Amino acid sequence: MCLLPNVGYKINYINLYVYLQNLGWKEVFSVRLPDSPLDVLDVGCGTGAMGLVLSKMGRRVKGIRLSENMRSIGREKAKKAGFQ
């Protein structure tokens, strides 16, 4: 059964895994962090996966990463998610 439309089966499986993993992080953050608004500095943010989870929860996130390639990927992910 294909749970995500318009992408191949392998991609669907990966996207489903990421979606479920993010639900787990959202639960952890919901329990451990104060309610919004909250400013978050994500040092060593990679491509921004945790920052996106927190942003979708209403937190204001600033990510810092030395690698320009990782920053570029993170900016593209944020743009696709409707941020920036």
Image (spheres, rainbow, N blue to C red):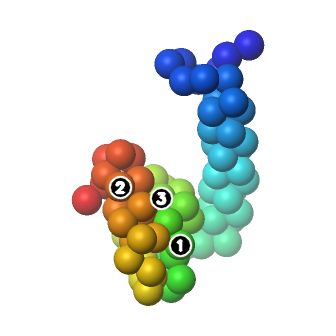
The residue at 42%/61% (across/down) is: 73
| Classed neighbour count for the residue bearing mark 1: other residues with Cα under 10 Å, few (<14), some (14–19), many (≥20) | some
User: In the picture provided, is 38 more to the left or to the right than 23?
Assistant: left
Residue at the front extreme, as displayed = 69
Distance (Cα) linking label 3 and label 1: 11 Å
Q: Return the residue at label 2.
A: 76
Asked which secondary structure carries label 1, the reply is loop
Report the residue at 74% width, 13% height from top.
1
Q: Kindly identify the amino acid type of the residue bearing the numbered disc 2.
A: Glu
Taking depth in this image into account, of 13 and 30 the one nearest to the observer is: 13
- Residue 18 image point, x, y percent: 66, 46
In percent of width and height, residue 67 lies at 44, 80
For disc 3, the neighbor class at 10 Å (few under 14, some 14 to 19, many from 20) is many
Q: Report the amino acid beneath label 1.
A: Gly
Which quarter of the figure has residue 36? bottom left
Of label 3 and label 2, which has the lower sequence position? Answer: 3
Q: Is residue 79 visible?
A: yes
Q: Which mark is residue 72?
A: none
For the residues labelled 2 and 1, the Cα–Cα distance comes to 13 Å
Q: Compared to 1, does 68 lie above or below?
A: below
- Say which residue appears at 64% left-offset and 51% top-offset: 22
Q: CA distance from mark 3 to mark 2?
A: 11 Å
Q: Which residue is mark 3?
A: 52
